[in-house]
Image (tube, helix red, strand yellow):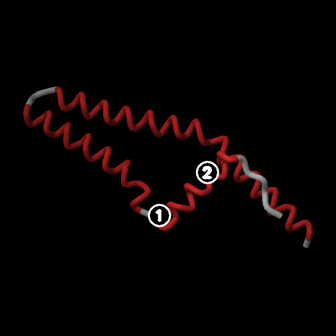
Amino acid sequence: MKPEFTEREKYIIAHIKSQESGAGISSIYPDILCVLVAVVLAVISIWMTDPTSIYVALIILIWHILKNAYATINYTSDYKNIFDKYDDTIKLLNEKD
C-alpha cells in the first residue's frame, strides 16, 4: 500500500532523492561558501579600513539567514505530512502481519 502524496510532496521527495548521491559535504557547501565569502569581505574591510565591505558581508549573511528561515517555514508542514503518511503506511503494514 503506497501513501497518496500531493504534487508538492512528490516534488519534495524527488528533490531529496536526487540529492542522496551527493550527501555529505556537498549538502552544506552553499552554507560554508556564504560564510566564507562574508568572512573574506569582513577581513578586507578591516584591512582596508573601509566599512563598505563589512556592510556587504552583513547583507550576504542576513540574506542567507532569511532564505533558510523562509525555506524552513515554507516546507516544515510538507515534511511533517510526508513523514506522517509514511508512518501511517508502516503502521498499516505492521497490522496486516
Q: Position of residue 63 (x, y in %)?
A: 38, 33
Quadrant of the rendering where the C terminus is positioned? bottom right
Quadrant of the rendering where the N terminus is positioned? bottom right
Q: Position of residue 67 (x, y in %)?
A: 45, 36
Give the amino acid at mark 1.
Answer: Ala
Q: Position of residue 20 (x, y in %)?
A: 52, 64
Upstream in sequence: badge 2 or badge 1: 2
Displayed quadrant of residue 41:
top left
Badge 2 marks a residue whose secondary structure is helix
Give the amino acid at mark 2.
Answer: Tyr
Q: Which residue is mark 2?
A: 11
Determine crowd level at label 1: few under 14, some 14-19, many 20+ residues with C-alpha closer than 10 A: few
The residue positioned farthest toward the left in the image shown: 48
Q: Residue drawn at (49%, 67%), measured in percent from left and top?
A: 21
Q: Is residue 84 above or below residue 45?
A: below
Q: Nearer the viewer, residue 13 or 25?
A: 13
Instruction: Tell me the number on the disc at residue 23.
Output: 1
The residue positioned farthest toward the bottom in the image shown: 97
The residue positioned farthest toward the front in the image shown: 7
Determine crowd level at label 2: few under 14, some 14-19, many 20+ residues with C-alpha closer than 10 A: few
How far separated are the C-alphas under marks 2 and 1? Answer: 18 Å
Displayed quadrant of residue 17:
bottom right
Q: Residue drawn at (37%, 50%), measured in percent from left and top?
A: 30
Q: Residue drawn at (60%, 51%), measured in percent from left and top?
A: 12
Q: Is residue 16 left or right of residue 6?
A: left
